[in-house]
């Protein structure tokens, strides 16, 4: 499970472009992305959702019944 919001904690000096590049790679290897509530208000979250959709990734939304309150944005299923 990877939350890209935590990238800044691991890498102190990521540029916006590099952070987006990493997020795109994470989406590419993910089975599912999870959109937090109010994702529509965030430009980056919208771009990530659109990118995931173009790749045919499953997209889940926090507002769906039965979803946890604070899951990560990107989820990689481990076999």
Image: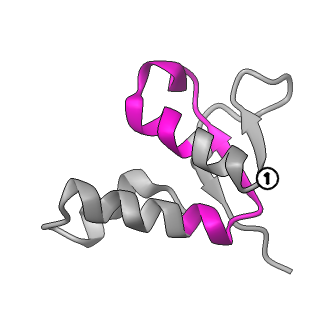
Question: Against 3, is 40 above or below?
Answer: above
Query: What residue is at 78 percent from the left and 68 percent from the top?
Result: 77
Question: In the picture provided, is 10 more to the left or to the right than 47?
Answer: left
* Quadrant assignment, res 31: bottom right
Residue 51 position, x and y percent, is 59, 48
Q: Residue furthest bottom?
A: 79
Residue 36 visible in the current orientation: yes
Check if residue 43 falls in the magenta segment: yes
Q: Which residue carries the number 1 mark?
A: 56
* Residue 74 point in image, percent of width and height: 61, 55
**Left or right of 3 on screen, residue 27:** right
- The residue that appears at 53% across and 45% down in the rendered structure is 48
Q: Residue furthest front?
A: 54
Residue at point 28% right, 71% down? 10
Q: Is residue 59 depicted above or below 64 in this figure?
A: below
- Report the magenta residues as a range: 26-48
Colour option used: one colour
Q: Secondary structure at mark 1?
A: loop
* Spot occupied by residue 55 in the image (x, y as percentages of width and height): 72, 56
């Amino acid at each position: 499970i990877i939350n890209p919001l935590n990238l800044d904690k691991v890498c102190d000096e990521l540029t916006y472009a590099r952070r987006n590049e990493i997020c795109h790679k994470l989406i590419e290897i993910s089975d599912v992305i999870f959109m937090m509530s109010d994702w529509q208000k965030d430009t980056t979250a919208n771009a990530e959702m659109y990118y995931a959709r173009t790749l045919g990734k499953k997209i889940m939304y926090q507002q769906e019944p039965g979803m946890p309150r604070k899951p990560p944005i990107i989820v990689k299923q481990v076999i």
